[in-house]
Amino acid sequence: MFLDNDQIESLLPMSECIQVMKDLFLLDAEKDIINPLRTTMPLQNATNGIMGMMPAFIRPYEVMGIKILSIFPDNYKKGLSSHQGVIHLYETVTGQLMTSLDADGITGIRTAAVSGLVTSLLAIPEAKNLCILGSGVQARKHIEAMLEVRDIKTVTLWSLNRSSAERLATDMEKYVGIDFIVCDTIQEAAKDADIICTVTAATEPILENDYLKSHVHINAVGACTASTRELASAIINSSDVYVDNRLSAANEAGELLIPAKENGHDALDFIKADISEMLKDANLYDASKKTVFKSLGVACEDIAAGLYCYTKSKA
């Protein structure tokens, strides 16, 4: 069996995926998941392409799997997705293949769903203003996820490609009662935001600390290597920082590694909690503070989302 993007979109609504991710990280809190660091192979050529391999074993679900993914940041210039690949799921009695799924569809939904889960904890309850930096698949999915967890009234959009942001705003007109505003500058887009999602291909900081409200929550999603970042060091230095996985963040998150090197610190010093810790202890976070969720994505998210789709398709 192979589940393609259209099937995944039908089987995995954002609201359901947010719950799947919550259930998953509650299991992670009980140490019922084996989730090794991903292996990445930078191509070291003009494309800046990366191949990644991400395995995981979710013991209570009796499933293991691997995502094999290519990441080509400049694909948007060709009208292609930056993330392409496949997820294989195996049962854990005989190791037989259960199904394969298009990784693009799973990655798009589960990444935004995890941001939605974290935002439900870290954004102020009365958050109304959302800022999206970027205009690709993750921009669209993060709008969906944020609307699931907060009563958003205004969405400001910025993209290096203004026409792409304008198309996104037009597509989002299906959400009645929400104003979508395309901005000329990042500062204009961010200045009134209660929630900001950075989902760009930037390799150097685009978001500065003096653009921000004191209580803003930021989902930093776009940068996924140790040498790239979207947020200025001053933001990390002045925020409570949360991650999906401490080990991954300490090895791969340029958002943390670069400021740590500047300050002579360990990247782990920035991290207040990971998602599983937050779900177990509400005292670890305060929505009235400026917060950052550094999203890298871990394989167990793909395996859990893929299993949910597979199980639902067999019902």
Image: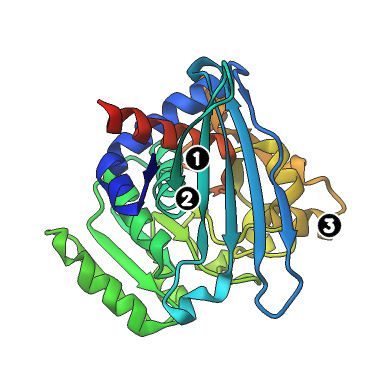
Q: Estimate how packed mark 3 is, as few (under 14), some (14 to 19) or many (20 or more) residues with alpha carbons within 10 Å.
A: few
Q: CA distance from mark 2 to mark 3?
A: 33 Å
Q: Which quarter of the picture shows residue 311?
A: top left
Q: Badge 2: how crowded within 10 Å, few (<14), some, or many (20+)?
A: many
Label 2 amino acid?
Answer: Ala
Residue type, numbered disc 3: Lys
Q: Quadrant of the C terminus?
A: top left
Q: Residue at x 51, y 61 (%)?
A: 83
- Where is 173 relative to 183, above or below? above
Tag 1: amino acid: Asp
Residue 65 x %, y %:
56, 34
> x, y percentage for residue 286?
50, 35
Q: Are marks 1 and 2 in contact (CB under 8 Å)?
A: yes
Residue nearest the viewer, comparing 34 with 186: 34
Q: Residue at x 60, y 49 (%)?
A: 239
Residue ID for mark 1: 302
For label 1, the SS is helix
**118 relative to 227 in the view: left or right:** left
- In this rendered view, identify the residue nearer to me: 186 or 163: 163
Residue topped by disc 2: 103
- Residue 58 appears at what percent x and percent y? 55, 24
Residue carrying label 3: 261
Q: On the rendered structure, is 43 left or right of 218?
A: right
| Sequence-earlier tag: 3 or 1 | 3
